[in-house]
Image (tube, rainbow, N blue to C red):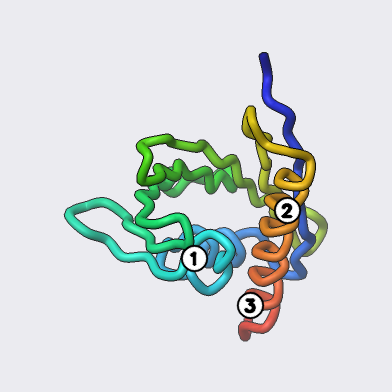
């Protein structure tokens, strides 16, 4: 059975390549995604994050010309979640879209809370990137 998905997006008034470069740099993630992680460092070739849920391992999609910023997050339990993230052209700016997948035992309130946290992170990304010179 397919999981329910919700596409959470924000328009950013900066060119796609600028947003993609910033959001695609894992070292910037703690600044714009504090809902997911508090810190991120590379250890023995793996990206390790500290979060409210404990130590996470994050594997990022390699740089590509398509605006794809997908990443897999593995929790301390060993469970891995695939997170689709795209930067799409939108006029002179772009739209960043995160697909939030509902997990099997998630209540409506929990799913709404997850979607709200993703929206807050994308809005933080917007504020940061739009506030940067150039």
Say whether residue 42 is left or right of residue 108: left
Distance from disc 3 to disc 2, alpha carbons, whole Å, reads 23 Å
* Disc 3 residue crowd, few under 14, some 14–19, many 20+, Cα 10 Å: some
Q: Residue at x 54, y 62 (%)?
A: 23
Distance from disc 1 to disc 3, alpha carbons, whole Å, reads 11 Å
Percent across and percent down for residue 83 are: 56, 41
Residue picked out by circle 2 = 113
| Front one among 134 and 74 | 74
- Tag nearer the camera, 1 or 2: 2
Percent across and percent down for residue 56 are: 38, 52
Q: Which residue lies furthest to the right in this view?
A: 91
N-terminal label among 1 and 2: 1
Residue picked out by circle 1 = 29
Residue picked out by circle 3 = 128
Say whether residue 23 is left or right of residue 79: right
Tag 1's secondary structure? helix
Q: Residue at x 39, y 57 (%)?
A: 54
Distance from disc 1 to disc 2, alpha carbons, whole Å, reads 20 Å
N-terminal label among 1 and 3: 1
- Tag nearer the camera, 1 or 3: 1
Tag 3's secondary structure? helix
| Front one among 76 and 1 | 76
Tag 2's secondary structure? helix
Quick check: marks 1 and 2 in contact, CB under 8 Å? no
| Front one among 76 and 24 | 76
Determine the image quadrant of residue 12: bottom right
């Amino acid at each position: 059975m397919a999981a329910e998905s919700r596409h959470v997006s924000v328009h950013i008034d900066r060119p796609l390549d600028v947003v993609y470069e910033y959001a695609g740099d894992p070292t910037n993630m703690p600044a714009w995604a504090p809902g997911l992680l508090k810190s991120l460092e590379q250890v023995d070739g793996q990206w390790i994050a500290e979060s409210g849920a404990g130590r996470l391992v994050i594997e990022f999609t390699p740089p590509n010309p398509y605006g794809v910023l997908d990443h897999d997050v593995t929790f301390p339990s060993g469970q891995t979640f695939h997170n689709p993230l795209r930067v799409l052209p939108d006029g002179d700016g772009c739209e960043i879209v995160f697909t939030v997948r509902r997990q099997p035992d998630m209540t409506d309130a929990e799913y709404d809370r997850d979607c709200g946290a993703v929206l807050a992170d994308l809005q933080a990304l917007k504020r940061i990137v739009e506030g940067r010179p150039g």
